[in-house]
Amino acid sequence: MPVIRPISDLRNKTPEIERICRKSGEPVFITKNGENDLVVLSAAAYERDQARLKLYELLAAAESDVRKGDRGVSLKTLAAVLRKARG
């Protein structure tokens, strides 16, 4: 269930909103005049979401390549690249 708070809470109850964001890892939606206005998110949750978004973008690009007929690299080539990367 999303947490929705008025903008006055952002000003008057900042530590409480901070605690909610950190504890739940989920955003707190801030309303102004009854309408959605802002979203507050912990830095850790933001970084998690950005990493997830980047992964989805990479997966979408890979799926597009496969649809176009690109078969990628062979297992032998991949193993060589990974060995080289490990040193």
Image (spheres, rainbow, N blue to C red):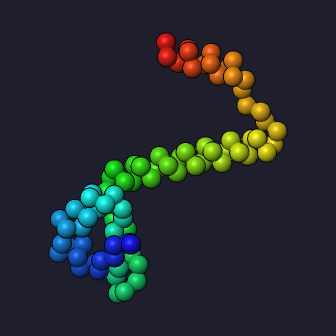
The residue lying at 49 percent from left, 17 percent from top is 86
* Residue located at (82% from left, 39% from top): 69
Q: Residue furthest right?
A: 69
Q: Residue lying furthest front in this view? A: 1
| Image-based side of 13 in relation to 87, left or right | left
Res 8 seen here? yes
In the figure, residue 62 lies in which quadrant?
A: top right
Question: In the depicted view, which residue is nearer to us: 18 or 23?
Answer: 23
Residue at the image position 76 percent from the left and 41 percent from the top: 66
The answer to whether residue 38 of the structure is visible from this angle is no
Which quadrant: the N terminus? bottom left
Residue 57 horizontal/vertical position (percent): 60, 48
User: Residue placed at 18% from the left, 72% from the top?
Assistant: 13
Residue lying at the far top of the rendered structure: 87
How many numbered marks appear? 0
Residue 53 position in % (x across, y down): 52, 51
| Vertical side of 14 occupied by 79: above or below | above
* Residue 68, placed above or below residue 75: below
Picture coordinates of residue 60, whole percent (x, y)? 66, 48
In the shown orientation, is residue 66 left or right of residue 85? right
Q: Left of 9 or right of it: where is 74? A: right
Could you tell me residue 82's position as x and y percent?
Answer: 57, 20
